[in-house]
Image: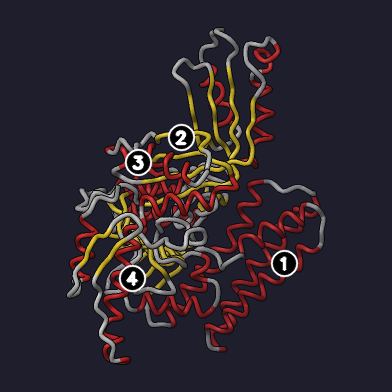
Amino acid sequence: MQVLKFGGSSVANSDSIKRICSLLEKKPKGKYAIVVSALGNITDQLIQCSKLASERNNVYKNIIEKIKIRHFNIIRELFPIYYQSHLISWIKKNINTLESLCHYIFKVKALSKRTLDEIMSFGELFSSFIISKKLKKYGLNAIFKDSRELIITDSKFGCAKVDFITSNHHILQFFRKEKSEYVVLPGFIGSNLKNQTTTLGRGGSDYTAAILASAISASLLEIWTDVSGMMTANPKMVNQAFPIKEISYEEAMELSHFGAKVIYPPTIQPAMKKNIPIQIKNTFYPIDPGTLIHISKKKKIRQLVTGISGIQNLVLFTLKVSGMIDISGYSKRLFEVLSREKINVIFIIKNSSEHFITTGIHEMDILKAKTVINSEFSKEIYQKYIDPLKIEYDLCIIALVGDNIKNIHVTSGKIFSSLGKNRIHVRAISKGYTEKNISAVIQKKDFKKALNTLHETFIVRKVENKLLEKINKKKNYFLEKLKLQIIIIGLSNIKKIYFYNNHGINLSKCKSNFMNKSVI
Protein backbone atom coordinates (compact mmCIF):
# COMPACT_ATOMS: atom_id res chain seq x y z
CA MET A 1 0.00 0.00 0.00
CA GLN A 2 1.17 3.52 -0.80
CA VAL A 3 0.38 6.90 0.74
CA LEU A 4 0.24 10.01 -1.45
CA LYS A 5 -0.05 13.58 -0.21
CA PHE A 6 -1.09 16.53 -2.39
CA GLY A 7 -0.34 20.06 -1.16
CA GLY A 8 -2.36 23.25 -1.53
CA SER A 9 -0.75 24.26 -4.83
CA SER A 10 -1.60 20.79 -6.21
CA VAL A 11 -5.30 21.30 -5.42
CA ALA A 12 -5.50 25.03 -6.17
CA ASN A 13 -8.31 24.84 -8.76
CA SER A 14 -10.44 22.48 -10.83
CA ASP A 15 -7.69 21.89 -13.41
CA SER A 16 -5.28 20.87 -10.62
CA ILE A 17 -7.84 18.44 -9.20
CA LYS A 18 -8.38 16.92 -12.66
CA ARG A 19 -4.61 16.55 -12.97
CA ILE A 20 -4.47 14.66 -9.65
CA CYS A 21 -7.32 12.35 -10.68
CA SER A 22 -5.64 11.63 -14.01
CA LEU A 23 -2.35 10.91 -12.23
CA LEU A 24 -4.04 8.49 -9.80
CA GLU A 25 -5.93 6.82 -12.63
CA LYS A 26 -2.60 5.88 -14.23
CA LYS A 27 -1.21 4.32 -11.04
CA PRO A 28 -0.73 0.54 -10.99
CA LYS A 29 -3.56 -1.44 -9.44
CA GLY A 30 -3.32 -1.45 -5.66
CA LYS A 31 -4.47 0.32 -2.50
CA TYR A 32 -3.76 4.01 -1.94
CA ALA A 33 -4.31 6.44 0.90
CA ILE A 34 -4.55 9.98 -0.53
CA VAL A 35 -4.00 12.87 1.88
CA VAL A 36 -4.89 16.36 0.65
CA SER A 37 -4.39 19.90 1.88
CA ALA A 38 -6.95 22.69 1.67
CA LEU A 39 -7.26 24.59 -1.61
CA GLY A 40 -4.43 27.13 -1.91
CA ASN A 41 -4.83 30.09 0.48
CA ILE A 42 -8.07 28.78 2.07
CA THR A 43 -6.46 28.11 5.48
CA ASP A 44 -5.16 31.69 5.60
CA GLN A 45 -8.64 32.98 4.76
CA LEU A 46 -10.19 30.87 7.52
CA ILE A 47 -7.71 32.27 10.04
CA GLN A 48 -8.38 35.78 8.79
CA CYS A 49 -12.17 35.53 9.09
CA SER A 50 -11.92 34.11 12.64
CA LYS A 51 -9.62 36.95 13.73
CA LEU A 52 -11.87 39.58 12.15
CA ALA A 53 -14.86 38.06 13.95
CA SER A 54 -12.99 38.29 17.27
CA GLU A 55 -12.44 42.01 16.53
CA ARG A 56 -16.16 42.44 15.76
CA ASN A 57 -15.39 43.28 12.16
CA ASN A 58 -18.27 42.23 9.88
CA VAL A 59 -15.87 41.81 6.95
CA TYR A 60 -15.46 38.21 8.14
CA LYS A 61 -18.81 37.45 6.48
CA ASN A 62 -17.45 38.54 3.09
CA ILE A 63 -14.50 36.15 3.46
CA ILE A 64 -16.79 33.23 4.32
CA GLU A 65 -18.86 34.08 1.25
CA LYS A 66 -15.73 34.03 -0.92
CA ILE A 67 -14.73 30.63 0.51
CA LYS A 68 -18.22 29.27 -0.22
CA ILE A 69 -18.33 30.63 -3.78
CA ARG A 70 -14.86 29.29 -4.59
CA HIS A 71 -15.83 25.76 -3.58
CA PHE A 72 -19.20 26.01 -5.37
CA ASN A 73 -17.43 27.12 -8.56
CA ILE A 74 -14.99 24.22 -8.39
CA ILE A 75 -17.89 21.79 -7.97
CA ARG A 76 -19.63 23.31 -11.01
CA GLU A 77 -16.43 23.04 -13.07
CA LEU A 78 -15.74 19.43 -12.04
CA PHE A 79 -19.16 17.75 -12.07
CA PRO A 80 -22.18 17.51 -14.39
CA ILE A 81 -25.26 19.49 -13.31
CA TYR A 82 -27.24 16.45 -12.07
CA TYR A 83 -24.40 15.57 -9.66
CA GLN A 84 -23.79 19.04 -8.22
CA SER A 85 -26.73 19.54 -5.83
CA HIS A 86 -25.63 16.86 -3.34
CA LEU A 87 -22.08 18.24 -3.16
CA ILE A 88 -23.20 21.87 -2.91
CA SER A 89 -25.62 20.88 -0.16
CA TRP A 90 -22.82 19.20 1.82
CA ILE A 91 -20.56 22.27 1.48
CA LYS A 92 -23.43 24.62 2.39
CA LYS A 93 -24.20 22.61 5.54
CA ASN A 94 -20.58 22.93 6.69
CA ILE A 95 -20.43 26.61 5.73
CA ASN A 96 -23.44 27.14 8.02
CA THR A 97 -21.47 25.56 10.86
CA LEU A 98 -18.51 27.82 10.04
CA GLU A 99 -20.77 30.87 10.11
CA SER A 100 -22.21 29.82 13.49
CA LEU A 101 -18.71 29.47 14.95
CA CYS A 102 -17.65 32.88 13.66
CA HIS A 103 -20.88 34.46 14.91
CA TYR A 104 -20.17 33.04 18.37
CA ILE A 105 -16.63 34.50 18.24
CA PHE A 106 -18.13 37.83 17.16
CA LYS A 107 -20.52 37.84 20.14
CA VAL A 108 -18.00 36.90 22.84
CA LYS A 109 -15.23 38.98 21.22
CA ALA A 110 -12.69 36.21 21.87
CA LEU A 111 -10.99 33.51 19.81
CA SER A 112 -9.72 30.42 21.60
CA LYS A 113 -7.16 28.05 20.11
CA ARG A 114 -9.70 25.27 20.29
CA THR A 115 -12.23 27.23 18.18
CA LEU A 116 -9.52 28.29 15.73
CA ASP A 117 -8.56 24.64 15.18
CA GLU A 118 -12.16 23.77 14.41
CA ILE A 119 -12.43 26.66 11.95
CA MET A 120 -9.16 25.78 10.19
CA SER A 121 -10.29 22.17 9.70
CA PHE A 122 -12.94 23.13 7.11
CA GLY A 123 -10.36 23.74 4.34
CA GLU A 124 -9.05 20.16 4.33
CA LEU A 125 -12.52 18.68 4.87
CA PHE A 126 -13.91 20.50 1.82
CA SER A 127 -11.02 19.65 -0.55
CA SER A 128 -10.79 15.95 0.42
CA PHE A 129 -14.57 15.46 0.12
CA ILE A 130 -14.67 17.03 -3.37
CA ILE A 131 -11.61 15.05 -4.59
CA SER A 132 -13.03 11.75 -3.31
CA LYS A 133 -16.22 12.37 -5.30
CA LYS A 134 -14.27 13.36 -8.42
CA LEU A 135 -12.23 10.15 -8.24
CA LYS A 136 -15.49 8.18 -8.20
CA LYS A 137 -16.56 10.03 -11.34
CA TYR A 138 -13.29 8.82 -12.91
CA GLY A 139 -14.51 5.28 -12.25
CA LEU A 140 -12.13 4.67 -9.34
CA ASN A 141 -13.29 2.86 -6.22
CA ALA A 142 -12.75 5.84 -3.88
CA ILE A 143 -14.20 6.92 -0.53
CA PHE A 144 -13.84 9.88 1.82
CA LYS A 145 -12.60 9.22 5.36
CA ASP A 146 -12.41 11.86 8.09
CA SER A 147 -8.89 11.81 9.59
CA ARG A 148 -10.29 12.94 12.93
CA GLU A 149 -11.66 9.41 13.38
CA LEU A 150 -8.18 7.93 12.97
CA ILE A 151 -5.58 10.36 14.31
CA ILE A 152 -5.94 10.90 18.05
CA THR A 153 -4.00 13.67 19.76
CA ASP A 154 -3.68 15.49 23.05
CA SER A 155 -5.54 18.78 23.65
CA LYS A 156 -2.66 21.09 22.75
CA PHE A 157 -4.69 23.08 20.24
CA GLY A 158 -2.73 24.70 17.42
CA CYS A 159 0.02 22.07 17.35
CA ALA A 160 -1.32 18.89 18.90
CA LYS A 161 0.87 15.95 19.88
CA VAL A 162 -0.14 12.64 18.31
CA ASP A 163 -1.02 9.64 20.48
CA PHE A 164 0.70 7.12 18.21
CA ILE A 165 -0.41 3.99 20.07
CA THR A 166 -4.13 4.85 19.84
CA SER A 167 -3.83 6.36 16.34
CA ASN A 168 -1.93 3.39 14.93
CA HIS A 169 -4.59 1.03 16.32
CA HIS A 170 -7.43 3.03 14.71
CA ILE A 171 -5.58 3.34 11.38
CA LEU A 172 -4.72 -0.37 11.16
CA GLN A 173 -8.26 -1.41 12.09
CA PHE A 174 -9.76 0.83 9.45
CA PHE A 175 -7.48 -0.15 6.55
CA ARG A 176 -7.72 -3.87 7.33
CA LYS A 177 -11.50 -3.70 6.93
CA GLU A 178 -11.76 -1.12 4.14
CA LYS A 179 -12.10 -2.63 0.68
CA SER A 180 -11.97 0.60 -1.36
CA GLU A 181 -8.79 0.99 -3.40
CA TYR A 182 -8.58 4.78 -2.93
CA VAL A 183 -9.17 6.38 0.47
CA VAL A 184 -9.10 10.19 0.47
CA LEU A 185 -8.37 11.85 3.82
CA PRO A 186 -8.02 15.47 4.96
CA GLY A 187 -4.53 16.31 6.14
CA PHE A 188 -3.56 18.56 9.05
CA ILE A 189 -6.38 17.58 11.42
CA GLY A 190 -7.02 15.11 14.22
CA SER A 191 -9.14 14.95 17.37
CA ASN A 192 -8.61 14.55 21.10
CA LEU A 193 -10.27 12.02 23.39
CA LYS A 194 -13.27 14.36 23.76
CA ASN A 195 -13.78 14.32 19.96
CA GLN A 196 -12.74 17.97 19.72
CA THR A 197 -10.95 18.96 16.51
CA THR A 198 -7.19 19.55 16.78
CA THR A 199 -4.56 20.53 14.21
CA LEU A 200 -1.00 19.26 13.74
CA GLY A 201 0.65 22.61 12.99
CA ARG A 202 1.14 24.38 9.67
CA GLY A 203 2.55 21.87 7.20
CA GLY A 204 0.65 19.18 9.09
CA SER A 205 -0.77 17.53 5.96
CA ASP A 206 2.69 16.09 5.25
CA TYR A 207 2.73 14.85 8.84
CA THR A 208 -0.72 13.23 8.44
CA ALA A 209 0.58 11.30 5.44
CA ALA A 210 3.66 10.16 7.37
CA ILE A 211 1.56 9.03 10.36
CA LEU A 212 -0.64 6.93 8.06
CA ALA A 213 2.36 5.52 6.16
CA SER A 214 4.09 4.51 9.38
CA ALA A 215 0.97 2.89 10.87
CA ILE A 216 0.28 0.70 7.83
CA SER A 217 3.99 0.16 6.99
CA ALA A 218 3.45 1.59 3.51
CA SER A 219 5.82 0.64 0.72
CA LEU A 220 6.22 4.30 -0.31
CA LEU A 221 5.20 7.78 0.80
CA GLU A 222 4.83 10.26 -2.06
CA ILE A 223 4.71 14.00 -1.38
CA TRP A 224 3.30 15.80 -4.44
CA THR A 225 4.05 19.51 -4.56
CA ASP A 226 4.83 22.31 -7.06
CA VAL A 227 8.61 21.74 -7.26
CA SER A 228 10.63 18.86 -8.68
CA GLY A 229 12.14 17.70 -5.40
CA MET A 230 14.49 19.08 -2.78
CA MET A 231 17.00 21.48 -4.31
CA THR A 232 20.70 21.97 -3.63
CA ALA A 233 19.74 25.51 -2.55
CA ASN A 234 16.79 27.87 -2.81
CA PRO A 235 16.39 28.36 -6.59
CA LYS A 236 14.96 31.85 -6.01
CA MET A 237 18.31 32.81 -4.49
CA VAL A 238 20.73 30.54 -6.39
CA ASN A 239 20.27 30.28 -10.16
CA GLN A 240 22.57 27.24 -10.36
CA ALA A 241 20.54 25.20 -7.85
CA PHE A 242 19.20 21.88 -9.12
CA PRO A 243 17.10 18.99 -7.72
CA ILE A 244 18.79 16.43 -5.48
CA LYS A 245 18.16 12.95 -6.86
CA GLU A 246 18.71 11.00 -3.64
CA ILE A 247 19.17 12.11 -0.06
CA SER A 248 19.29 10.40 3.33
CA TYR A 249 16.60 10.90 5.97
CA GLU A 250 19.09 12.75 8.20
CA GLU A 251 20.19 15.11 5.43
CA ALA A 252 16.57 15.88 4.53
CA MET A 253 15.74 16.63 8.17
CA GLU A 254 18.71 18.98 8.49
CA LEU A 255 17.82 20.88 5.30
CA SER A 256 14.20 21.15 6.45
CA HIS A 257 15.24 22.40 9.89
CA PHE A 258 17.32 25.12 8.28
CA GLY A 259 14.58 26.48 6.05
CA ALA A 260 14.07 24.12 3.07
CA LYS A 261 10.26 24.26 2.80
CA VAL A 262 9.62 21.39 0.41
CA ILE A 263 8.81 18.99 3.25
CA TYR A 264 7.51 19.61 6.79
CA PRO A 265 10.33 18.48 9.18
CA PRO A 266 8.26 16.18 11.50
CA THR A 267 7.15 14.20 8.41
CA ILE A 268 10.48 12.44 8.08
CA GLN A 269 10.67 10.87 11.55
CA PRO A 270 7.73 8.38 11.32
CA ALA A 271 8.83 7.26 7.84
CA MET A 272 12.45 6.87 8.94
CA LYS A 273 11.46 4.66 11.91
CA LYS A 274 9.82 2.19 9.52
CA ASN A 275 12.40 2.73 6.74
CA ILE A 276 9.65 3.91 4.34
CA PRO A 277 11.10 5.75 1.31
CA ILE A 278 9.74 9.26 0.72
CA GLN A 279 9.47 10.43 -2.88
CA ILE A 280 8.99 14.16 -3.51
CA LYS A 281 7.33 14.72 -6.89
CA ASN A 282 6.06 17.64 -8.96
CA THR A 283 2.31 17.50 -9.66
CA PHE A 284 2.74 19.74 -12.71
CA TYR A 285 5.74 17.80 -14.13
CA PRO A 286 5.13 14.22 -12.99
CA ILE A 287 7.77 12.80 -15.35
CA ASP A 288 10.51 14.62 -13.41
CA PRO A 289 12.34 12.11 -11.18
CA GLY A 290 12.01 14.28 -8.06
CA THR A 291 13.91 13.46 -4.86
CA LEU A 292 14.04 10.10 -3.11
CA ILE A 293 14.58 10.28 0.66
CA HIS A 294 15.65 6.95 2.06
CA ILE A 295 18.11 5.17 4.31
CA SER A 296 21.66 6.45 4.01
CA LYS A 297 23.84 4.25 1.84
CA LYS A 298 27.52 4.45 1.02
CA LYS A 299 27.73 6.75 -1.97
CA LYS A 300 29.98 5.91 -4.88
CA ILE A 301 30.91 9.57 -5.13
CA ARG A 302 32.54 11.14 -2.14
CA GLN A 303 30.28 14.14 -2.11
CA LEU A 304 30.96 16.56 0.69
CA VAL A 305 27.84 18.77 0.63
CA THR A 306 24.40 17.58 -0.48
CA GLY A 307 22.58 20.87 -0.07
CA ILE A 308 22.75 24.35 1.41
CA SER A 309 19.92 26.01 3.28
CA GLY A 310 19.47 28.98 5.55
CA ILE A 311 17.23 31.02 7.81
CA GLN A 312 17.01 34.78 7.56
CA ASN A 313 15.97 37.19 10.33
CA LEU A 314 18.07 35.58 13.04
CA VAL A 315 18.86 37.22 16.39
CA LEU A 316 21.69 36.15 18.69
CA PHE A 317 21.51 36.79 22.41
CA THR A 318 24.23 36.03 24.94
CA LEU A 319 23.73 35.17 28.59
CA LYS A 320 27.02 35.62 30.45
CA VAL A 321 27.99 34.87 34.05
CA SER A 322 30.04 37.72 35.55
CA GLY A 323 33.56 36.96 36.72
CA MET A 324 34.23 33.52 38.20
CA ILE A 325 30.96 33.23 40.15
CA ASP A 326 29.55 29.71 39.96
CA ILE A 327 25.86 29.56 39.05
CA SER A 328 25.34 25.88 38.30
CA GLY A 329 22.47 24.87 36.07
CA TYR A 330 21.80 28.28 34.59
CA SER A 331 21.91 26.88 31.03
CA LYS A 332 19.24 24.33 32.01
CA ARG A 333 17.04 27.13 33.36
CA LEU A 334 17.56 29.15 30.18
CA PHE A 335 16.40 26.39 27.83
CA GLU A 336 13.54 25.38 30.11
CA VAL A 337 12.09 28.89 30.04
CA LEU A 338 12.48 29.09 26.24
CA SER A 339 10.81 25.71 25.83
CA ARG A 340 7.97 26.71 28.14
CA GLU A 341 7.28 29.75 25.95
CA LYS A 342 7.54 27.65 22.74
CA ILE A 343 10.51 29.68 21.48
CA ASN A 344 12.40 27.63 18.90
CA VAL A 345 16.18 27.57 19.39
CA ILE A 346 17.99 27.54 16.05
CA PHE A 347 21.63 27.90 17.07
CA ILE A 348 23.66 27.38 20.26
CA ILE A 349 27.27 28.26 21.18
CA LYS A 350 28.35 27.25 24.67
CA ASN A 351 31.83 27.49 26.14
CA SER A 352 33.17 24.57 28.17
CA SER A 353 33.36 26.52 31.43
CA GLU A 354 29.66 27.45 31.12
CA HIS A 355 30.43 31.14 31.63
CA PHE A 356 28.36 32.15 28.59
CA ILE A 357 25.79 30.76 26.18
CA THR A 358 25.01 32.39 22.85
CA THR A 359 21.68 31.34 21.39
CA GLY A 360 20.10 32.06 18.01
CA ILE A 361 16.33 32.46 17.63
CA HIS A 362 13.99 34.01 15.06
CA GLU A 363 13.75 37.79 15.43
CA MET A 364 9.95 37.62 15.88
CA ASP A 365 10.55 35.80 19.20
CA ILE A 366 13.17 38.14 20.67
CA LEU A 367 10.81 40.45 22.62
CA LYS A 368 9.13 37.48 24.30
CA ALA A 369 12.51 35.82 24.93
CA LYS A 370 13.99 38.97 26.43
CA THR A 371 11.02 39.40 28.78
CA VAL A 372 10.97 35.82 30.09
CA ILE A 373 14.77 35.55 30.43
CA ASN A 374 15.02 38.82 32.34
CA SER A 375 12.21 37.61 34.57
CA GLU A 376 13.81 34.19 35.15
CA PHE A 377 17.22 35.67 36.01
CA SER A 378 16.07 38.95 37.56
CA LYS A 379 17.65 38.18 40.93
CA GLU A 380 21.03 37.19 39.44
CA ILE A 381 21.05 40.22 37.10
CA TYR A 382 20.22 42.55 40.01
CA GLN A 383 23.04 41.03 42.07
CA LYS A 384 25.33 41.38 39.02
CA TYR A 385 26.05 37.65 38.98
CA ILE A 386 24.77 37.59 35.39
CA ASP A 387 25.29 40.38 32.84
CA PRO A 388 22.27 41.99 31.17
CA LEU A 389 21.27 40.17 28.00
CA LYS A 390 23.41 41.10 24.98
CA ILE A 391 21.40 41.05 21.74
CA GLU A 392 22.71 41.13 18.14
CA TYR A 393 20.23 41.87 15.33
CA ASP A 394 20.19 41.66 11.49
CA LEU A 395 21.81 38.22 11.24
CA CYS A 396 21.07 35.03 9.36
CA ILE A 397 22.30 31.45 9.39
CA ILE A 398 23.62 29.38 6.48
CA ALA A 399 23.82 25.58 6.87
CA LEU A 400 25.82 23.16 4.71
CA VAL A 401 24.34 19.67 4.93
CA GLY A 402 25.85 16.34 3.92
CA ASP A 403 26.42 12.82 5.23
CA ASN A 404 30.18 13.15 4.64
CA ILE A 405 30.73 16.47 6.41
CA LYS A 406 31.81 14.74 9.63
CA ASN A 407 34.63 12.95 7.78
CA ILE A 408 36.17 16.09 6.27
CA HIS A 409 38.44 18.14 8.54
CA VAL A 410 38.89 21.05 6.16
CA THR A 411 35.20 22.00 5.77
CA SER A 412 35.24 24.88 8.25
CA GLY A 413 38.42 26.23 6.69
CA LYS A 414 36.86 26.13 3.21
CA ILE A 415 33.78 27.96 4.50
CA PHE A 416 35.87 30.70 6.12
CA SER A 417 38.10 30.96 3.04
CA SER A 418 35.21 31.07 0.57
CA LEU A 419 33.23 33.64 2.54
CA GLY A 420 36.33 35.65 3.44
CA LYS A 421 37.31 36.08 -0.22
CA ASN A 422 33.89 37.61 -0.79
CA ARG A 423 34.17 39.90 2.24
CA ILE A 424 31.47 38.09 4.18
CA HIS A 425 32.15 38.22 7.92
CA VAL A 426 31.38 35.04 9.90
CA ARG A 427 29.99 35.89 13.35
CA ALA A 428 29.88 32.27 14.57
CA ILE A 429 30.24 28.74 13.25
CA SER A 430 28.92 25.49 14.68
CA LYS A 431 28.88 21.79 13.87
CA GLY A 432 25.47 20.18 14.33
CA TYR A 433 24.79 17.47 16.90
CA THR A 434 24.13 14.95 14.10
CA GLU A 435 27.50 15.85 12.52
CA LYS A 436 25.71 16.20 9.19
CA ASN A 437 25.72 19.98 9.05
CA ILE A 438 28.02 22.92 9.59
CA SER A 439 26.28 26.24 10.06
CA ALA A 440 27.60 29.79 10.00
CA VAL A 441 26.02 32.97 11.33
CA ILE A 442 26.56 36.01 9.08
CA GLN A 443 25.03 39.43 8.43
CA LYS A 444 21.52 39.25 6.92
CA LYS A 445 22.53 41.57 4.05
CA ASP A 446 25.04 38.92 2.88
CA PHE A 447 22.55 36.02 2.82
CA LYS A 448 22.10 35.69 -0.95
CA LYS A 449 25.77 36.31 -1.70
CA ALA A 450 26.81 33.66 0.85
CA LEU A 451 24.39 31.06 -0.57
CA ASN A 452 25.76 31.54 -4.08
CA THR A 453 29.38 31.63 -2.92
CA LEU A 454 29.12 28.39 -0.93
CA HIS A 455 27.04 26.67 -3.61
CA GLU A 456 29.74 27.46 -6.18
CA THR A 457 32.48 26.29 -3.81
CA PHE A 458 30.95 22.99 -2.73
CA ILE A 459 28.34 21.95 -5.31
CA VAL A 460 29.09 23.70 -8.64
CA ARG A 461 30.80 20.70 -10.24
CA LYS A 462 27.45 19.01 -10.72
CA VAL A 463 26.40 22.04 -12.75
CA GLU A 464 29.42 21.39 -14.98
CA ASN A 465 28.02 17.91 -15.63
CA LYS A 466 24.61 19.40 -16.49
CA LEU A 467 26.33 21.66 -19.02
CA LEU A 468 28.09 18.66 -20.58
CA GLU A 469 24.76 16.84 -20.89
CA LYS A 470 23.15 19.81 -22.66
CA ILE A 471 26.07 20.22 -25.11
CA ASN A 472 26.02 16.51 -25.90
CA LYS A 473 22.27 16.56 -26.60
CA LYS A 474 22.53 19.63 -28.84
CA LYS A 475 25.31 18.19 -31.05
CA ASN A 476 22.85 16.07 -33.04
CA TYR A 477 20.42 18.97 -33.35
CA PHE A 478 23.11 21.26 -34.85
CA LEU A 479 24.22 18.51 -37.24
CA GLU A 480 20.71 17.67 -38.50
CA LYS A 481 19.12 21.14 -38.57
CA LEU A 482 22.05 23.46 -39.25
CA LYS A 483 24.53 21.04 -40.88
CA LEU A 484 27.13 22.04 -38.31
CA GLN A 485 29.42 19.50 -36.71
CA ILE A 486 30.55 20.65 -33.28
CA ILE A 487 33.84 19.26 -31.99
CA ILE A 488 34.76 20.05 -28.39
CA ILE A 489 38.55 20.04 -28.03
CA GLY A 490 38.91 21.21 -24.43
CA LEU A 491 37.26 21.80 -21.06
CA SER A 492 38.59 24.09 -18.36
CA ASN A 493 37.65 26.47 -15.62
CA ILE A 494 39.54 29.50 -14.31
CA LYS A 495 41.86 27.26 -12.28
CA LYS A 496 42.64 24.26 -14.43
CA ILE A 497 42.40 22.62 -17.89
CA TYR A 498 40.70 19.28 -17.32
CA PHE A 499 40.62 17.85 -20.83
CA TYR A 500 42.32 18.77 -24.12
CA ASN A 501 42.57 16.94 -27.44
CA ASN A 502 42.98 18.53 -30.89
CA HIS A 503 40.89 15.76 -32.46
CA GLY A 504 37.95 16.21 -30.06
CA ILE A 505 36.97 14.76 -26.70
CA ASN A 506 34.25 12.30 -25.63
CA LEU A 507 31.80 14.30 -23.46
CA SER A 508 30.31 11.18 -21.87
CA LYS A 509 33.73 10.16 -20.58
CA CYS A 510 34.36 13.70 -19.39
CA LYS A 511 31.19 13.59 -17.35
CA SER A 512 32.20 10.25 -15.83
CA ASN A 513 35.63 11.64 -14.91
CA PHE A 514 34.08 14.76 -13.37
CA MET A 515 31.79 12.60 -11.25
CA ASN A 516 34.71 10.54 -9.97
CA LYS A 517 36.82 13.55 -9.03
CA SER A 518 36.75 14.80 -5.44
CA VAL A 519 34.62 17.92 -5.10
CA ILE A 520 36.95 19.43 -2.51
For the residue pair 133 and 276, the one nearer the viewer reads as 276
Q: Amino acid at mark 4?
A: Glu
Q: Which is more foreground, mark 3 or mark 1? A: 3
Q: Amino acid at mark 1?
A: Ile
Please state the horizontal and vertical placement of residue 402, each as a whole percent of the image: 33, 46
Q: In whole angstroms, how far apart are the C-alphas of marks 2 and 4?
A: 51 Å
Residue designated by label 1: 63
Q: Amino acid at mark 2?
A: Ile
Task: Determine which of the numbered discs, if any, sits on residue 240 in the image.
Answer: none
Q: Which is more foreground, mark 4 or mark 1? A: 1
Q: Which is more foreground, mark 2 or mark 3? A: 2
Q: Is mark 1 in CB contact (under 8 Å) with mark 2?
A: no
Residue designated by label 3: 436
Q: Which is more foreground, mark 4 or mark 3? A: 3
Secondary element at image label 1:
helix
Secondary element at image label 3:
loop
Q: Is residue 365 left or right of residue 272?
A: right
Residue designated by label 2: 429
Task: Determine which of the numbered discs, if any, sits on residue 181 in the image.
Answer: 4
